[in-house]
Amino acid sequence: MPSDASATLQATLPATLLYAPVPAVKGRGTVWAIEHRFSSTHTEALDDGWGTLEQAAQEEQVAPGTQLIEERVRSILTGNDSPDIGFDLSINPYRGCEHGCIYCYARPTHSYLNLSPGLDFETRIIAKVNAAERLRDTLSGRDYTPLSLNIGSATDAYQPAERRLRITRGVIEVLAEAQHPFSIITKSALIERDLDLLAPMAAQRLAAVYVSLTTLDPELARKLEPRAAAPARRLRTIETLAKAGVPVGVSVSPVIPFLNEPELERVLEAAAAAGASTAFSIVLRLPWEVNPLFQQWLQQHVPQKAERIMARLRDMRGGQDNDARFGHRMRGQGVWAQLLRQRFEKACARLGLNRARVELDLSRFRRPSRQPGQASLF
């Protein structure tokens, strides 16, 4: 993406659209069905002279329901070409995420489906129902070479739909059969369900988990991440995984100045006390449609801090709302970004985090058996 991605988007959207008077609704990160950047038309809220917009903003709204859309995909592994990310391949069993985190950098991916990165991203969930089948096909191929693999980089693999569909569990079952190492990042306590698979693999250096813990404040978490597990529940998940012998790291991400940034050290302390052994942190990113969505969220929930938060973010993004350049997008730049990094590193050193790197073992890989009735070409 170009470094001025957010500015490009804002230039294409009417000013009235950027901060449309959409009220906050409990249980959703946003109910703004913002047009995506590929839309051929744009709509604007219009006051008819009778106070329609003000009345709509004051009326109680019900959280929109979630629609699950089943999809059979041709492939399930995605390659990574970013030097900022420490894995080569990723699996995302779902598209969109019902957790509804307002800051999610993956929201713009719904644009490619001709869906809104706002409301649709958290209410229209694409379930890749044949993910395990496609993974087995790939791993059993003679040209496949095992590489570092992450599950859940662009959508939470343990979001609510997984309770019933069990797509992620099916994927892990194939990886377990193939002895293929992987890592998972999640905000959900549902991952504890799969400890019967994760613990034995972790004992062979084949699995590691990262739990995203943005804040310890349940009220803030409910607004930022409305359908994710509560902070205290995530800490208990870290403890449960660690006691089962699964290497657990914590992601204190994204760091939002003046919002969750003051908690940085406390979040790391709580995670370390629960059993986390590693940690990483990423400064808030605002690519494409995430920028207006997040700025509207600020005006709804913390209007007194909104201007200050955006000013500090711009200080760390070279004067822009977003900087998509490799090497800059995760950490930011300038004095404030350096201070954040120093605080993070000093806290990790004091707490004993990141003393040892989690090395997963690629040498154990063995090709899984093919599907019954599937003939080999070799």
Image (cartoon, grey):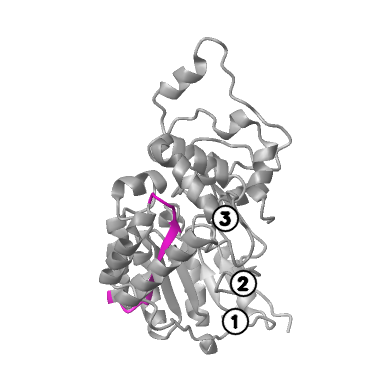
Q: Residue at x 57, y 55 (%)?
A: 317
Residue at far bottom of view: 363
Measured Cα–Cα span from mark 2 to mark 1: 19 Å
In the rendered structure, find residue 83 and report the number of the disc placed on it. 2
Q: Which residue is mark 3?
A: 317
Q: Position of residue 113 (x, y in %)?
A: 65, 47
Question: Given the image, on which type of amino acid does mark 2 rest?
Answer: Pro
Q: Amino acid at mark 3?
A: Arg
User: Residue 357 appears at what percent x and percent y?
Assistant: 44, 82
Q: Quadrant of residue 19?
A: top right
Pick the residue in front: 61 or 334.
334
Which of marks 3 and 2 precedes in the sequence?
2
Look at the image and give the residue range highlighted in magenta. 243-259
Specify which label sits upstream in the sequence, 2 or 1.
2
Please name which of the two marks, 2 or 1, marks the residue nearer to the observer. 2
Q: Earlier in the sequence, mark 3 or mark 1?
A: 1
Q: Which corner quadrant of the image does residue 166 belong to?
A: bottom left
SS category of the residue bearing label 1: loop
Asked if residue 244 is among those painted magenta in the image, a careful observer would answer yes
